[in-house]
Image (cartoon, grey):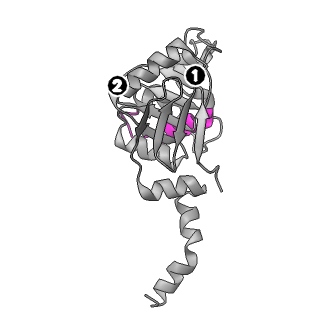
Amino acid sequence: MKQKFDIIESTCVPLPLENVDTDQIIPARFLKATDKEGFGDNLFRDWRYDKDGNPKPDFVLNDPTYGGCILVAGKNFGSGSSREHAAWAIAGYGFRVVVSSFFADIHKNNELNNFVLPVVVSESFLSELFASINANPKMTVKVDLPNQTITNMATGSSEYFEINGYKKHCLMNGLDDIDYLIQNKDKIESWENGNR
């Protein structure tokens, strides 16, 4: 069983860039691997490190001012190719939530399948979040999956977010698709045996 999702309150890492595609999230040269291990080390690799592998001090993941398990990203996050490795890298780094005003559909589903919650907010709420983080990097955001709300704890403003009911159930119970099927094995066998 994976880590169950309920209510998360955390400081945030701001990435106020629009149209961040999956090649920027995890460069293509890292796609040969078929195992999720170590992918977090290469999240935003070309933005994070110079060609010699030294951390770039001006990139947000290398700035000790910011931390936490919530990534706040600009509009249109995860566009480009459908590579699941991008979601592996986000999860592998330790992010549990990504907030944006728009996600590419395939990437959004890949995040959900890897126990990362993509939260879609209005552009005004996203702008307020960036302003709050900028004013105080230690401010927190509360994401309440049971009630499907996200709250900027610095201002008290809150928004409702949508999530597929099945995916919500899986996140809250720490189940991936296979776990869900195994959990319902008796019901499936009963149906197959004609007990409908």
Residue 81: x and y in percent read 38, 37
| Front residue of this view, candidates 139 and 114 | 139
Q: Is residue 76 above or below residue 96?
A: above
Label annotation for residue 73: none
Residue flagged by tag 2: what amino acid is it?
A: Ser
Residue 92 lies in the magenta-colored region? yes
Q: Is residue 121 above or below residue 63?
A: below
On screen, residue 23 versus residue 146, left or right, reads left
Label annotation for residue 124: 2
Among the 4 quarters of the image, the one containing residue 180: bottom right
Residue flagged by tag 1: what amino acid is it?
A: Met
Name the secondary structure under disc 2: helix
Label annotation for residue 139: 1
Sooner in the amino-acid sequence: mark 2 or mark 1:
2
Name the secondary structure under disc 1: loop
| Front residue of this view, candidates 84 and 145 | 145
Residue 146: x and y in percent read 51, 51
Query: What residue is at 53 percent from the left and 43 percent from the top?
Result: 144
Residue 24: x and y in percent read 45, 25
Question: Label 1: how many residues lie within 10 Å, few (<14), some (14-19) or many (20+)?
Answer: some
Image quadrant containing the N terminus: bottom right
Residue 149 in sight here = yes
Q: Is residue 58 above or below residue 126?
A: above
On screen, residue 154 versus residue 52, left or right, reads left
